[in-house]
Amino acid sequence: LGAQFILAGEVVEAAIEQSKCKKYDYTAKKDVYYTCYNYLLNFNLKIIDVETGVVISSKNLNIKNQGSWISSGYSTSEDVAESKAFNSARGMVLAWINEVFPAQMKIIKVEEFDKNGFPKKVLISGGADMDMIKGSDLNVNEVEVIEFDGKSLERKKSIATLRVLEAGQDVSVCKVTSDADVLQSKLNEQKQLSLSIKSYQ
């Protein structure tokens, strides 16, 4: 009641794949074979504008055909394989929703510098309130405003990446995982920066 958008979808396929896996037993000094399981999911999603009925975005999560089958990785238990697949699915769905409705997050300050004077840890606005958890990956984007045909257009370019170390309710601590030198340069130049969720873990 009162919703602006509805998330709807359908499961196309959900299946357990059973296989034989092997690992090396260093005590027995030989390969040991065992039964392992892989849970596979294939489903379609769409976001619908309640007022107009228009589908504003849709997503097919089917890694089998386009590198989009969600695969948990082989496990020795059906339950573990299923749990891993569902966790992966949850992360991919949240990442897609964030693409459609980008979270407004920014770097608050640099918490720690490395030996070269580049950002090592940063404090950001955003956390559990946006479903982020420890291990979630973020892009740091430089925002360029382009005036064209009487309109102001925004262009975002990824300049660095972060990984969440501690997810608070609305403030998180992140590790700079790439291009710390570029990030420092943009901070020194006081460029307009924003954050976007790259993946949920």
Image (cartoon, rainbow, N blue to C red):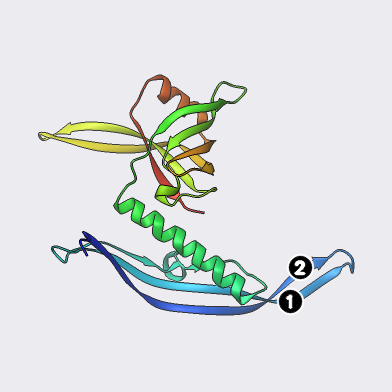
Q: Amino acid at mark 1?
A: Tyr
Q: Is residue 11 left or right of residue 77?
A: left
Number of numbered discs on residues:
2
Examine the image and state in which quarter residue 12 appears: bottom left
Percent coordinates x, y for residue 180 in the rendering: 51, 30
Residue that mark 1 sits on: 34
Q: Residue 32 at x, y = what percent?
A: 80, 73
| Vertical comparison of 184 with 198: above or below | above
Secondary element under disc 1, as helix, strand or loop, is: strand
Position of the N terminus by quadrant = bottom left
Which residue is depicted at the point 45% across and 48% down? 128
Closer to the chain start, of discs 1 and 2, is 2
> Are the residues at dot 1 and dot 2 in contact (C-beta closer than 8 Å)?
yes
Closest to the observer, 99 or 130? 130
Q: Quadrant of residue 93?
A: bottom left
Residue nearest the observer in this picture, 176 or 28: 176
Callout 2 environment at 10 Å: few (<14), some (14 to 19), or many (20+)? few
Q: Quadrant of residue 115?
A: top right
- Residue holding disc 2: 23
Residue 20, given in percent of the width and then of the height, sits at 69, 77
Which amino acid does the dot numbered 2 rest on? Lys
Q: Residue furthest right?
A: 28
